[in-house]
Image (cartoon, helix red, strand yellow):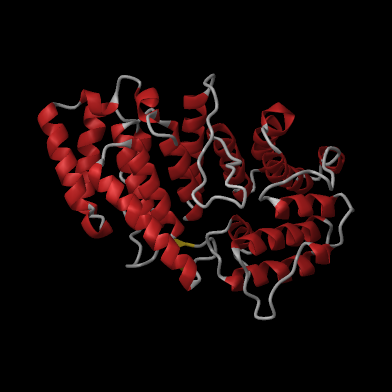
Amino acid sequence: MRTGEIQHWRGGRGRTALAPVFQGWLRAALAAETAGYGIGLAFGCIVTLLLAGCSGATSGSRAAGVSSASGAALPPGVQAISFRGDTLREFPLAPATRARYEQQLAEAHAAYVRTPTNVDSIIWLGRRLAYLGRIRESIDIYTKGIAMYPDNPWLYRHRGHRYVTVRELDRAIADFERATRLVAGKPDEIEPDGQPNARNMPIGTLHSNIDYHLGLAYYLKHDFARAIPVYRRRMLGEAQNYDQIVSTGHWLYMSLRRLGREDEAKESLVAISRDMPVIENQVYHRLLLLYKGELPVDSVLALTPSGEMSVTDATAAYGVGNWHLYNGRRAEAEAIFRRILAGGQWGAFGYIAAEKEMAGIR
């Protein structure tokens, strides 16, 4: 989100509706609350509720709290309960990666302390917390932002993403659907990358990321019929680059295959070719070429002997496992899904999808 977008999305509501004295108190309170990155849950809930009353926030701006979708309190340090009932804690990050993310978080936190009611500061703090696996704190930050700016689609887009991460799919869908309504009829905008690609060229936009994650949330609920029109809308004219085409095309193809609509799935691959200049979604591109019969499976899926996977590996592995599944090779599919779960990258979409497939299976 670019600096200044807060003015565009304020819509006459939010901080301008607060009394000046309360504005000053809020700024000081939020800065003090987040000193050292800590989130004071009880105080935060009070602030959120007060802001919601002043700004006319919708029911979507509830305080997140440290609880699961069922409302049950989570044990200390637990970010989520998996679809299989396991506790999910910190992300398995390499030391160098963790150090880089911590530095980025420190910078985002400093900006937030300086301007705690600025939407850019709120979003970047939430994003940096999430990269480190501090998902509940990230959700809490976005929720406070929504209380101040209930008509800002960027906040719903990012909070919805993190509800997907913690397996709270109904909450995610509610946020993405709200964001969809808020951007309807408005120009699209580039979304800056949290971790830039090799060309330092952002491939996502506000609209595309709302649609991508909304379709994903439907897919993860195995509501494939509702995922398909979201992805089709992207493919039939709204996708703005080849990376968007292959990422969207991947989930569209899989949704169609899971519903047995093989002819439509095959048709969705017609425009996919080897020479597409994809910048960062090469895994999705290779998977689509696999589905099209132009690449062998071993060119897509390659794991280390220890079974460790990166986020990208989990995505590739899920695509291959799902390919086995809808082609009637369930044993092969389950073997790959188990390998994904053993890899530990629980924040990856491929991991979440594999976990959903294996829910109830031990």
- Residue that lies at the very extreme toward the left in this rendered image: 21
**Res 90 visible:** no
**Picture residue at 47% right of the left edge, 26% below the top:** 182
Instruction: Where is residue 129? Give x, y as percent.
Output: 39, 55
- Residue that lies at the very extreme toward the front in this rendered image: 199
Quick check: 188 left or right of 225? left
Quarter of the picture holding the C terminus: bottom right
Quick check: 243 left or right of 156? right
Instruction: Where is residue 218? Give x, y as percent.
Output: 60, 43
- Residue that lies at the very extreme toward the right in this rendered image: 293
Is 159 in front, or is 7? 7
Instruction: Where is residue 133? Give x, y as percent.
Output: 43, 61
Is 102 in front, or is 201? 201
Is 133 in front, or is 45? 133
Quick check: 263 left or right of 285? right
Count of marks placed on residues: 0
**Picture residue at 64% right of the left edge, 34% below the top:** 230
Instruction: Where is residue 188? Give x, y as percent.
Output: 55, 27
